[in-house]
Amino acid sequence: MKTPEILALLESGQYQNAKDSAEKALLSEPDNALLNYYAAWSCDGLSIENDAIPYYEKALELGLPKTDLADAYIGLGSTYRAIGNYEKAGETFQKALAAFPENQALAVFASMALYNDRNYKEAMQLAIKIIGETSNDPNIIAYKKAILNYSEDLDAVWD
């Protein structure tokens, strides 16, 4: 089965079929980054996170197309977070944010990993910044400058 067919299975939620197809294809193409990524994605969809990690790591190591790279970082970081490896999750999201600084989804996941790693202030600051930068809510927009200013240091006090 070719990668477009496996992608279609993933997108339609047929994770077991996608996993079986990706793993079968990997037998003849073990260094195919997309196949490794699709195998990882299918494992996540099946809630077998520990099985997903080596596939994500290999996909990233081999080099994914830029169109899939941010999603693979989200997948790997979220998987680390889901199994309680908050340090690795944080490292993954920081690396991803260095490569994709404008990707707000990565920033949201990074905020969750910071929270889980008990970096509450940094997590909250990042979350507030994301809200201030991306919200279309007119009430948020009205206070955007203040929200972004306060997000820089939640403990700041002005006399």
Image: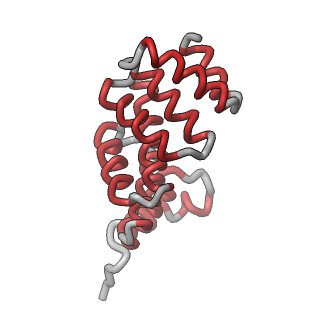
Colour mode of the rendering: secondary structure
Quadrant including the N terminus: top right
Residue 137 x/y as whole percent: 62, 56
137 relative to 30 in the view: left or right: right
Total marks shown come to 0
Residue at x-position 39% and y-position 41%: 102
Give the percent coordinates (x, y) of residue 157: 32, 84
Q: Locate residue 13: give its quadrant.
A: top right
Q: Nearer the viewer, residue 29 or 105?
A: 29
Q: Nearer the viewer, residue 48 or 89?
A: 48
Please say if 132 is above or below 70: below
List x then y, in percent, for residue 23.
52, 23
In the image, residue 36 sits, relative to residue 137, either above or below, namely above
Image quarter of the C terminus: bottom left
Looking at the image, the residue that sits furthest to the bottom is: 159
Query: In the figure, residue 86 lies in which quadrant?
Result: bottom left
**Closer to the camera in the image, 85 or 152:** 85
Q: Residue at x 36, y 70 (%)?
A: 119
Is residue 94 shown left or right of residue 56? left
Image spot of residue 145 (x, y percent): 43, 62
**Image point (47%, 46%), residue name:** 50
Residue under the image location 60 percent in, 46 percent down: 47
